[in-house]
Image (spheres, grey):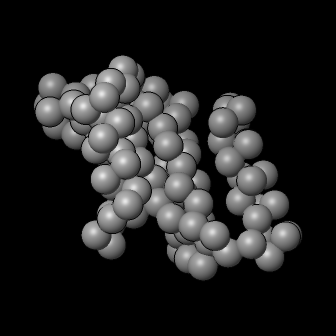
Amino acid sequence: ALSAGLAATALLTQALGDAAIDAPLWCATRGAVPTGRTDRLESPAQAQIWSLGRAVALEHPERWGGLVDLPETVDERVSARLVGVLADAGGEDQLAVRRS
C-alpha cells in the first residue's frame, strides 16, 4: 500500500518541478534503514521514501538533496549531528544519523 508519507513526498517533488524550483530537497525518515546488526528496521513504510528518493536522485538531480534516516528518539546529540550533516554532507546523499 502507498503510505501517506510516500504520497506526500512524491507530490512535493512533482510540485517543485511544476514550479521550476531546483532547491535541494532532503527527505528525513525515522527507522527506515538499519545500519548494523543491532540496528533494526523499525519502519518499513518509511523505507519506501528511500526507494522514491533514489529514483528522484537519478531522474531529477537538480532538485535532489538527499536522504537522512534518524533514530526513533532524537536528542541533542542526534540534532547536532543532523545539523552537521545538512551543513556539509561531504558529497553523500544517503545518510543515517545515530546517537553513537
Residue 24: % across, % down: 57, 67
- Residue at position x 68%, y 48% from top? 9
Residue 39 is left or right of residue 64, and the answer is left
Relative to the observer, which residue lies in front, 79 or 39?
79
Residue 96: % across, % down: 31, 45
Above or below residue 3? Residue 97 is: below
Residue 98: % across, % down: 25, 35
Residue lying farthest right? Answer: 18
- Residue at position x 39%, y 30% from top? 31
Relative to the observer, which residue lies in front, 26 or 53?
26
**Quadrant location, the N terminus:** top right
Residue 46 is left or right of residue 22, and the answer is left
Q: Quadrant of residue 76?
A: top left
Q: Quadrant of residue 74?
A: top left
Say whether residue 22 is visible.
Answer: yes
**Quadrant location, the C terminus:** top left
Above or below residue 99? Residue 26 is: below
Say whether residue 34 is visible.
Answer: no
Above or below residue 38? Residue 70 is: below
- Residue at position x 31%, y 53% from top? 84
Residue 85: % across, % down: 33, 55
Q: How many marks?
A: 0
- Residue at position x 22%, y 40% from top? 35
